[in-house]
Amino acid sequence: MDPNLRKGWTDVVLAEDLDRHLLENGQAQANAELLVQMLADSSVSEGASLLLVGAGTGQFLDFVDIEALVPFRLTCTDINARFLEALRARLERAPRLAADVLLDDIEETALQGPFDAAVAILVLEHIDWKKGVSSLVRLSPTWLHFIIQRNEAISQMLTATRELAPSIREFGRIATPTLISEPELTAALGAASYAPHRRHERPVPDGKRMVGLVYRR
């Protein structure tokens, strides 16, 4: 991971600012919808082990249909311990949803696996995505689910004209996330024997789209 990106996500961005940012730009809601749809697409069976990397504060739990996640054995990871504290608090408000919550770096994961399925929501843009994908492949999931961002007119992840929360603004000053090329991602996964299965999009403000991609081994 770019050292500035790592610093941004471990030392700079505050949990409350991240939640506010994703809520105001519509991504929290769109990504929750895509998550449920992608899991339905992949027909992951009841009792399956489901890994959510870069799970952050768990804000998706505010918008997702909890019943869509109850059948799975969840493992949620992130590199920011404070984000995971917020995630645990959300899980306490959803008692039917059990999950292991672990501090982990998907670029150099300590997870052992295997997992039946894995999900990464707006994670690849903030890491060395090839390392992250390699780590996920080594965990042997049958299904891989990604949400990536596609911009209509601008090349940056963050919208310069939007009023940003202070720690998000500081993150944008020191770090530069990189938009992911869908064809390059599909090619890398193809080399690891994963084929595209489903694709969905949700428009969000500022000329951006959230793209949900499901791959099957």
Image (cartoon, helix red, strand yellow):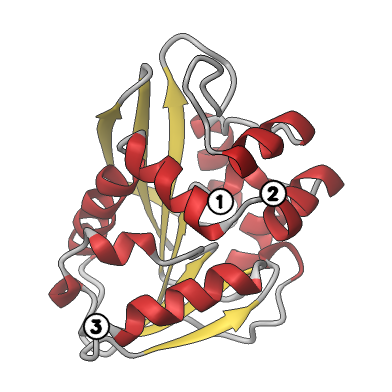
Q: Earlier in the sequence, mark 3 or mark 2?
A: 3
Q: Position of residue 50 (x, y in %)?
A: 39, 77
| Relative vertical location of residue 196 with respect to residue 14 in this rendering, above or below | above
Q: Nearer the viewer, mark 3 or mark 1?
A: 3
User: What residue is pinned by disc 3?
Assistant: 94
Q: Is residue 140 visible?
A: no
Residue drawn at x 36%, y 33% as measured from the top left: 25
Residue 110 sits in quarter? bottom right
Can you give x and y, in whole percent of width and height, for residue 119 in the image?
A: 43, 62
Which residue matches tag 1?
A: 123
Q: Quadrant of residue 210?
A: top left
Element under label 1?
loop
Residue 62 placement (x, y as % from top left): 25, 63
SS category of the residue bearing label 3: loop
Establish if 99 lies above or below 205: below
Give the amino acid at mark 1.
Answer: Val
